[in-house]
Each structure stands twice: as structure tokens, then as C-alpha cells.
Image (cartoon, rainbow, N blue to C red):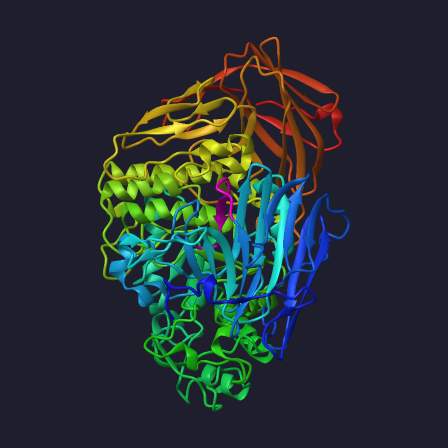
Amino acid sequence: MYFNKIPPSCNFIYQQDDAKLLATESTSAQAKLEDLGSDVYRFEVQSGKWSQASQAELDTQAFADTASVSTGTFSSSGLLEFSLKDKPLLSSQPEQAFGVLGKKWVLGFNYDEAMRFYGLGEKNTGLEKSGHITKFWNTDTVADFGMLNVEHKPTDPFYVTIPYLIIQQPGGCIGILLNNPWPSFMNLAAKEQIANLAGAKDNERPSITIGAYGGTPEFYFILGQDMRAVTRKLMQLTGKTPLPPLWAIGYQQCRWGYIDMEDLEELDKKFDELDIPCDGLWLDIDYMDAYKVFTVNEAIESQGAERIKALQANGRRIVPIIDPGVKYLPSYAAFESGKAANAFCQTEEGNLYSGFVWPGRTAFPDFSLPQAREWWTQQVKAFTEAYPFDGYWLDMNDPSTGSAELEDMRFNNGQEVHETYHNQYAFGMQQATQEGVKRARPDKRPFLVSRSGYISSARHSAIWTGDNYSNYFHLREGINVTLNLGLSGIPFNGPDVPGFAGKPTPQLAVDWYKAGFLFPFLRNHSEKSTPRQEPWQFAQPYCDIIAHYIRLRYKLLPYLYQQFMTQAETGDPLLRPVFYDFPQDFKRFERVGDQFMVGPDIMQAPKVNEDEAERTVLLPTGGWYDAAQGRWLENDNAYTHKHTLEATPLLFRQGSMVPMRVGHQTRANSQLSDIELHIFKRCQDTDVSTLTYRIDDGESIDSPVSTVTLRAHCKDNTLVVEATDATLDFHPLTLRLYCYDAFESIIFRHGIREEQLSILPGHSHLSGDAIKCSCTRTVHVMENEPSTTIAAR
């Protein structure tokens, strides 16, 4: 397969008949557009030459209760048109609306220069995608492109296939989801380039084309006023990320080369010695017996379970890798049981398909089959019951087969060609693995992270963005990949920090931590032939600076956890482009990928270029508090930040209330009931700020929850904070109030009680002790005890 070539629209035959779409002389294709409600439309073209192979878990009934206010039409001449509030958003090309080329097919749409393009799942090709040609096919990127290509330039396609395009226009936003696992492609108004050297003399009129090499054309058109509205509907359709265990949001430490429990115990001691919080300790392939999946090496076999439990008692969570490849070895229990269950992929002739992964000759589960998924589920359940691992890391599930041709790997007992299931192979592995973990621990939230994925993967697994490199190109593009994955339905994702391959300089390592310390998924991981890169491998002051940003993530963990709760309910990604929260400022931020929001109230603008001494930070509408400088920024569109080794632009939105852990964080723990409430309001701010704060035990599926609504407003240089609607089924709430303006007094109200609190000098711990603020003594929020709702100490 050529990754950089797609079928041009001029080679297709297009529908010209008013009654039906002609696929061939003998086979007609019937098309239908269906309004699902809530401005979501389903369009499908049915034909005997195509079959529906997608196993994505789509909730098409989610929109039925709300009538559409948009317009979507499909004319007898085969033209699609969509508009929102009488403003056109998308229309078919009159002469090239739907075309066929053998089993390939394509839809063509008119292009407008005001259009901006986002999404596309996992692509390291910048934030905005105008002028791009792209293909969707899960790759083992380093194996398929080579490390020299991976190191310095975009590699497309990548590990995850989500054929989803977002088009933003002045009149609104439309998302286009292609629910088809076959290799697919898009042309986003690209100009023809010859040998990547120069443009062709005569280019066709720019257009938008979306097509596939086979499979049923099934589209979902999602209309909304802005990116937030469209993204929430996409998540309703494809599935939101369930609330993960709290430890999975913490810091994770990994390396290809950690072999056994002794390595993890050394890490445990070192993190404690240096007062660096860390939740997860991870094991790569060396923990297995000869790289055989569902085995452990001799060192772990001996007292492994007891030593895992000892680490867990100190707050660590242990996460090993699992690959789908099963060593082709008759004496190996997993191979024998999989063969007996008819669980493995076959060739066209019905032989067992073999590829080559770490253990050598390897069989591969056929996750398209229910019995294969059930077999894998049982293997995961038994392994989890034998060794108390806390989660799993799913790798090589693109699938990666070494030197073996992929096309010989067939599915559904050898009856279906490879293209029908390749892009959703990892998705089947995610489904089956999650089910195995649930059966082993039905009361606990499962946690998986996967290299490859497909539509609806968010229901089952987080995504780490694969084998990256320690350089500034991957630092910059890692941000863009995470942002667009979040817009494409995979919000729980992140890159390896400070890069998997290569040797990070101390400065690069610091810059990577400063950029990524609030990413949804934060893991330090490295390749075994590279220098070790745990935080303490870098000399001072670099080690202390890295430790500071890890601690700052834990300080902000109450805020991050609230965003994951919101994500599970609405689908809003934690990391998102600035225009997601400020659609009125879209034009200023439409191509800005190195500035981003972390939830609605925090904005980052890290250093992403090696030699720059300063950068421009654009300010969206409203006031901002700059934690790096300890000052308010108002009535400015931008400012210049001069880079220092220690600081990074970290800005808090005026009017926000941000819950944080108390003081300086040196340990990972699940206690979020004792917090600091940082209130970023000015004395003259008369608007009411509201925060609904929720806590639970951080691990149980059905944990009791404590909820309280906190409101703050300012009047006559007095800050008034009120706690209402307290339902404390899990734990009472203790808080201290922090403010960042010269208030003369602070009043706290809860129930029928009101108390004026003394204002004390304090430190925010957001950027060292240099940033001073005001704080109060501790107050307690209790439920249904109005006479004793406030106590102070």
C-alpha cells in the first residue's frame, strides 16, 4: 500500500441518473439520508458489492429526543446539502457527488476558502489540515516508515484510524464521521504536487473528497454552532471515556528494560527518596518468559504476587505490557488453548496465519470472531487473578507482524480479506481485554492504554501516541496530535515524555515536562538502547525543575479529576484548542497549536522551539492571571514571555475557581476531600463564579460521591464564598480559600451560618515560593448540620 497516494477523483465514474446511483452496469446502489435528531444525520449507500464490517459501538438513538434545527437534504440527483440557521455549511459537488472505481467509492464536496479543517484522529501533521491529502490505515510507524523518517518529519498514516473530519466555517461547524474500517482517504483542497518538489501546472478546482477502498459508505454528519457542540455530539455517538481510576491520571514511569520486581522496587525507593510523586510503575516485554504473552519470567514467578502487593501498599500501581501475538509453540498453553478455541487468524487456504513479533513465529487472535474475543477475555481474567496487576498496556496491535505480509492475515475464519478488519484490530483487543479485567475485578474501574485504536476506542482504552523521538519536532507535534485526537473522540491520550527514542538534552527534557505536565496521560518511557531518563538521571537544576512540574500536576489533580468527570458526562476533552472555549476568538487561534486549554480555566503556552528566547502568548477574551509572573493580564491581546529554565506560561482564567491539593505535593494519594480553593477573581468582578466539586474513592465503579456547589462573588472589596447543595455521601469537604487580589475581607457562608475569615499571607506553589497570594484558615463543609457547618482551625 502506498501511504502517500490516493485515488484521484478524476478516475471515478459519477452518478448521473436521477433515480439511483449506478455502481456498475449490473449492480445499483441505493442511498438514504436519515435525520437522527439533534442536527445529526446518517447517510448510507447500500449495494451488493459492499458489506458493512464496522464493529464501532455507535449509539444512533442518542439524539432522538431533540428535533433538528438544521437542514439536511439529499436530492434525487444525488446531491447532499447541509445548512444551519439558513447558513450553508456543506454541499456536494454537482458533477462529482458520488463516484465509484471498482470497489472504491468517493464523495465530493464543494470547498470554500473560509473553511478550516480539524480532527482526522491521530495525525502528526499540524493542528489545522487545509491542503492535506491523508490516508487512514493503522501502521506500526517505526517499522513501516523507518526511524530516520519518524525522527524529523510527519509520518502519515499513524497508529490510530478515526476517519473523522471537522469543518469550521463562519456559519457554524460540521463533523463528518465515516463509519468504515476499510482503508480510507481524504483530500482537503490539496493542490497536486509532483514528486513533492513542485506543483502541477494545471490543478483541478480545489474540493473536499472522502472515500474508501471498499466497504459500505456510511457517514454521520454532525452539525453545531461551534466545535464544542459538535464534539459533544460525536462523543454521544461514538462513546464517552468512562471515569478512570484516579491513579491513572497521575504520573507513570516506564522503560523498555525494566525486567522484574527488583527494578520496580528500586524505582519505588528513588521516588520516595526524592519526594517525587508517582502512581504507576510499568513493565515492558522483558517481564515475560521468552516474550510469551500471559507469562512472567522466573524472577517474577518467584514471590511476584507478594512483591506486587508490597509496592501497591506504598501507593504504586503496576502495569505490564500485553501484545496480541501468541508464540507459535505447541507446548505453550496459550497457543494450544487458542488453537483449540479456533481463535487465531487464518490464511485464505484455512492455515494458521503466522507473523513475527518478539517471541519469533507468532499466531494472532482473530478479534473479529466472538469466540476469539471470549478466549482472549478468559486469558486476561486468569492472568489478572494470578498476578494482581492494576492495568494493562496494549502494544503491537496495529497489528504488527514483522516481515510477514499483512494481506495474508485474514479474518472470520479466513473468509474476509485483511482490509475488512485491520483498522479495528486493536479495538477488538481493547474490548476483550477490558471485559477480562472486569470479570477479574468487577467492582473496580479498569484501566487500559493502547497504541492503536479505532472509532469507539474511548469506551475501552486510553491511547498513548506511539513511538516518538526526543526532539522539538515531536514535542510540537505531540501537542497537535493530542488536541486533534481529543476532538476526534479519543480525549484520554498523550505522548511519551520526554520522547521514547533518542537522547534528550536536559533542556529538552525540562521543556517537554513543562509542555506536557497537564496532558491527559503523562508517562515517562524510553527505548532500552537509549540513556535512562528517569527524572533523577538529569543533573541539577534540571532534576528539581522536572520534579516541580510532576508535583504541580499532583497539586492540580483535584481540578484534573473534575475535568475527567465532566468528560465522562459531556465528552469535553481535557486538552483542547483555545477556540474550543473561546469561539468568538476563532480567527486568532485557528492555526495556533502551541497554545492550548486544559479544561475551561487553565491555558498553557509552552516553549516548543529549541532556540527561541521568547514567545508571543495570545490572550483570549477576558482577564488572565499569569502564575509564572504572579500578575494579572488585562486589556491586552497578547504579551511577550521571555523563556527561563524554571518557568512556563501557565494562565488562569479570570472568574475561575480551581480546586487544588494542599501545599507542596511529594506523594501520590487518592485523598481529594482536603483542598485549597483558588479563586481567580478581581475586586471589581461582579459576576458570580460557580464550581460544582465532586469527590469519590477514586477506584470503585459504584463509589459513593460527595458533591457541593461553591459560588463566589465580590462586593465592596469583599469576597463572598457560599457552599450550597452539599450531598456528602463519600466524605466531608475541608477547604482553604486562596485569592489573588487585594480584598479587604472574605466571608464564607454555608447553611444558616456566616463567618468572616481572617486574610493571611500565603504562597500558591504554582511557580515556586515567589508567587504570593492571600489565604484563609481551614473551613469544613458538612451536610445537614446548619448549626455546626463552619469550624475553623
Residue 656 in picture, x, y percent from top left: 56, 27
Decide if residue 231 is in sight here.
no
Residue 618 in picture, x, y percent from top left: 42, 28
Q: Does residue 204 show up magenta in the picture?
A: no
**Which residue sits at x=31%, y=36%?**
545
Comparing 198 with 338, the one in front is 198
Decide if residue 656 is in sight here.
yes
Residue 751 in picture, x, y percent from top left: 73, 24
Residue 82 in picture, x, y percent from top left: 64, 48
Task: Name the image quarter holding the C terminus.
Answer: top right
Count the marks: how many?
0
Above-or-below relation of 104 to 725: below
Horizontally, is 67 left or right of 168 in the view?
A: right
Quarter-of-image position of residue 655: top right
Comparing 13 with 682, the one in front is 13
**Which residue sits at x=48%, y=33%?**
587
Horizontally, is 250 left or right of 639 in the view?
A: right
Overall secondary structure of the magenta section: loop
Task: Name the image quarter holding the N terminus.
Answer: bottom left
**Which residue sits at x=70%, y=42%?**
729
Horizontally, is 602 left or right of 143 in the view?
A: right
Comparing 155 with 324, the one in front is 155
Comparing 21 with 304, the one in front is 21
Above-or-below relation of 379 to 725: below
Magenta region: which residues? 111-122
Above-or-below relation of 118 to 54: above
